[in-house]
Amino acid sequence: MLEQVHSLDLIYEKETTQKLLEFKLKYLVSYATLMRNYFMHMNFSDIVTELSAKENPKARQILLIAAMTVSPNALDYPAKLEDVTEDIIE
């Protein structure tokens, strides 16, 4: 009898885990599609133009992040944010 209870408990746990993983997978696939669509429809030249016009240091950092997103292999980016210089941003 105790063995049957353990078996039922394991079956319930397996089904619950399976349903949870299916839900998470659907969510992640939908999220990946959304992010891909955002990326495909972003106009990076407008973003770069607007951020370049700003004098705020945060705008420069965002510009560097945009560059790293668009072409991650184009430059040898620094490992730390503190190592970012104006030469790298230009």
Image (tube, helix red, strand yellow):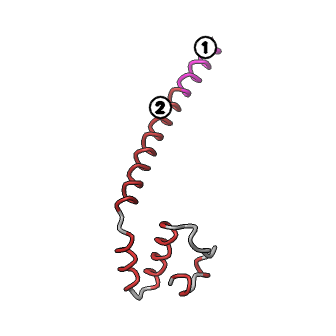
Q: Which mark is residue 19?
A: 2
Under mark 2, the amino acid is: Lys
Q: What crowding class fits label 2: few (fewer than 14 Cα within 10 Å), some (14-19), or many (20 or more)? A: few
2 or 1: mark nearer the eye? 2
In terms of image quadrants, where is residue 82? bottom right
Q: What crowding class fits label 1: few (fewer than 14 Cα within 10 Å), some (14-19), or many (20 or more)? A: few
Q: CA distance from mark 2 to mark 1?
A: 23 Å
**In which quadrant will I find the N terminus?**
top right
Residue at the spot x=62%, y=74% of the render? 76
Residue at the spot x=37%, y=54% of the render? 37
Q: Which residue is mark 1?
A: 4
In terms of image quadrants, where is residue 40? bottom left
Mark closest to the chain's N terminus, 2 or 1: 1
Residue at the spot x=49%, y=72% of the render? 67
**Residue 19, relative to residue 60: is it above or below?**
above
Which stretch did the figure color magenta?
Answer: 1-14
Under mark 1, the amino acid is: Gln
Q: Position of residue 13 (x, y in %)?
A: 55, 28
Q: Is residue 46 magenta?
A: no
- Depth check, front residue: 74 or 31: 74
Q: Position of residue 17 (x, y in %)?
A: 53, 32
In the displayed structure, does residue 82 sit left or right of residue 21? right
**Residue 88, relative to residue 12: is it above or below?**
below
Q: Position of residue 32 (x, y in %)?
A: 44, 50
Is the stretch drawn in magenta largely helix, strand or loop? Answer: helix
In the displayed structure, does residue 7 sit left or right of residue 49? right
Secondary structure state at the residue bearing disc 1: helix
